[in-house]
Amino acid sequence: MTEDLTQNKNLATTSETATSKTSTSGTVRLSVASQQAIDAWLQKFPAEQRQSAIIAALSIVQAENGGWLTTELIDLVADYVGVTKIHAYEIATFYSMYELKPVGRHKICVCTNIACMLRGADDIVKHLQDKLQIGFGEITADGKFSLKAVECLAACGGAPMLQIGAKYYEDLTQARVDQILVELE
């Protein structure tokens, strides 16, 4: 699924894919590219299990919308997939991979679970906050970075760790964090 979602993220680079396009009637609509990508996921499940595609559908639309979901987009995805709006909201608010407000171009998700904390995640968090001059849930003034605390990224053996996009960075030190930030600029 990660490969498919990463490929879908690349849809945002074409001119026709802005998900939050406003039609001539002033309403927000799903792009053709979003619909095609969601259709591909819907085909993977029996017709009576369309709701199984909701996670992928929300991910596709979020990637095309600059990394976050609006209420209107969640409603559109719910209608398109054929689930209730509340079901789509439950998914969008439960999983930490979804954002309901704008994020930086590089969303830095720092694992704050016990394994990472025992191996120095507090120091990594403080270093990131000092270096970027932002706290959790904030965006740098230039829009490049946002910082998010996440409960677990299932990489305890490489703690402390963080995720940026689909890439994991493990066994972090402050020097390694600085190197990562330079590589992203």
Image (cartoon, grey):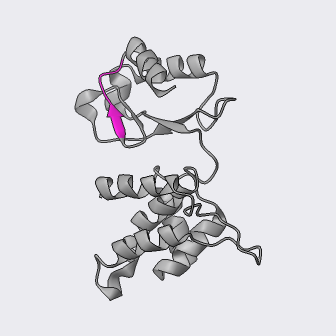
Residue that sits furthest to the bottom in the current view? 48
| Rendered position, 139 above or below 130 | below
Residue that sits furthest to the left in the current view? 157
Determine the residue positioned at 35% across, 72% down. 41
Residue that sits furthest to the front in the current view? 15
In the picture, measured across the screen, residue 98 lies left or right of residue 102, that is left
Determine the residue positioned at 64% across, 47% down. 102
Is 67 or 184 nearer to us in this picture?
Answer: 184
- Tell me if residue 59 can be seen: yes
Taking the magenta stretch, the answer to whether it contains residue 130 is: no
Q: Position of residue 73 (x, y in %)?
A: 60, 67
| Rendered position, 6 above or below 24 | above
Taking the magenta stretch, the answer to whether it contains residue 170 is: yes
Q: Position of residue 65 (x, y in %)?
A: 58, 56
Determine the residue positioned at 53% across, 76% down. 78
Is 167 or 129 nearer to us in this picture?
Answer: 167
Is 27 or 158 nearer to us in this picture?
Answer: 27
Snapshot quadrant of residue 1: bottom left
For the image shown, how many numbered marks are present on the structure?
0
- Tell me if residue 86 can be seen: no
In the picture, measured across the screen, residue 95 lies left or right of residue 27, that is left
Q: Which portion, as a residue range, is magenta?
A: 167-172
Q: Position of residue 114 (x, y in %)?
A: 35, 32
Q: Position of residue 111 (x, y in %)?
A: 40, 34
In the picture, measured across the screen, residue 49 lies left or right of residue 130, that is left
Is 82 or 94 nearer to us in this picture?
Answer: 82
Snapshot quadrant of residue 28: bottom right
Residue that sits furthest to the top in the current view? 175
Determine the residue positioned at 57% across, 71% down. 30
